[in-house]
Amino acid sequence: MKMTWRWYGEGNDSITLDHIRQIPGVEGIVWSLHDKVAGEEWEFEKIKEVTDLIKSKGFNADIVESVNIHDDIKLGLPSRDRYIEIYIDTIKKLSEVGVKVICYNFMPVFDWTRTDLYKELPDGSNALYYEKNAIVDDPKVMAERILEGGKNFTMPGWEPERIAKLDELFKSYEGMTEEALFENLKYFLEKVIPVCEQYDVKMAIHPDDPPWPIFGLPRIIRSRDHIKKFIELVDSPYSGLTLCTGSLGPNLLNDIPAIIREFHDRIHFAHIRNIKVYENGDFIEVSHRGKDGSVDVYEVIKAYHDNGFDGYMRPDHGRHLWGEEKECRPGYGLYDRALGVMYILGVWDSLDKQKGGN
Ligand code: DNO
Ligand code: MN
């Protein structure tokens, strides 16, 4: 297992690479060109500049999260072919600097959705929260709330340029079914995966967050059966998964350790996040410790360990601690994610010892 850390780039993240160097066990930086909107070309010089910087601090730059997919591809519009060409061009450039995995998602319109970015927990820290009844029918109102909460930061998935076109976007998705969305994903993968095989770059789809349809939009990566269907779309190890426990976790019917055991050979990237699901279905993000939430994080890590997982792993969202929410992007503070790294490595090392390793 290779421990990694998501970083938003020089001048775009309050956490520096020098900070990250002091967190034990972090080998790689999960990066992206965060000023790029879906469908835009990625210039080689920019890719090289970021990855050189990351490597100069002793980290690998093997994972990009994310290269976002243009809605025309998800919608299956004729213009998708042009956007797929651009995507393929980016894959080729990324392979040149040694990128091994691209994390992406196939959620229509929105990436993750929450109703409160700074909900206070009983210990005084705060975290991202999802209250079912606070999801208003009007996605515009929701979007405004999220943009207001995170107004000091760029927030992947919530680019103001896209949100400005929300009405139009929702109109184009009218009538979209799960089946059609799967078809459009298949079309995309059939074009892209042969290139990935040739250039040795793996695609790793991120599950939908939360794992149910919202605002009438279908969501197709949200349960064991959906994942199975995805795996069968294109039969290649290059079409794989980012397994995010915090995204699958809010549906308590998702047996995440079982999902990991079933699909481990297609999991290239593991996101570890814990959430606490309340009786009414609301949920809040909590520390990575298994006992603090509804995800059995120990069993999750054990499932990876038992299968000799040698892919990439990272702590996903953390709480905001000790007042840091003023300077960090929602979910991406320093302290709780650093604690998360240590918790994950603690479990991993002890499993190694039990197996007679070192
Ligand atoms: C939260 C994050 C996601 C992820 C994108 C990948 O779980 O990991 O926002 O970055 O969905 O495209
Ligand atoms: Mn995730």
Image: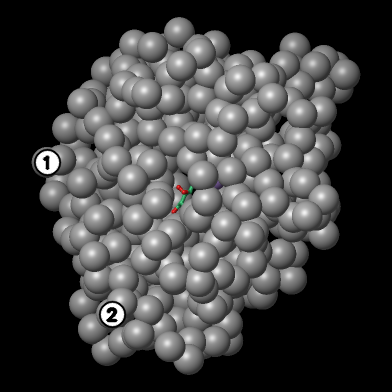
Residue underneath mark 1: 45
Q: Which of 54 and 330 is in front in this view?
A: 330
Look at the image and tell me whether residue 198 can be seen.
no
SS state under label 2: helix
The amino acid on which the numbered mark 2 sits, given as a three-letter code, is Glu
Q: Which of 328 and 118 is in front in this view?
A: 118
Image coordinates for residue 134, horizontal then vertical, percent: 57, 57
Q: Which of 117 and 273 is in front in this view?
A: 117
Please tell me the numbered disc located at residue 168: 2
Report which quarter residue 270 is drawn in: top right
Which residue occupies 74% across, 55% down?
A: 281
Q: Which of marks 2 and 1 is nearer the N terminus?
A: 1
Q: Is residue 309 left or right of residue 72?
A: right
Q: Nearer the viewer, residue 97 or 212?
A: 212
Image coordinates for residue 8, horizontal then vertical, percent: 32, 33
Up/down of 208 relative to 214, above or below = above
Up/down of 293 relative to 191, above or below = above
Which residue occupies 35% across, 85% down?
A: 171
Up/down of 58 relative to 69, above or below = above
Image coordinates for residue 12, horizontal then vertical, percent: 25, 31
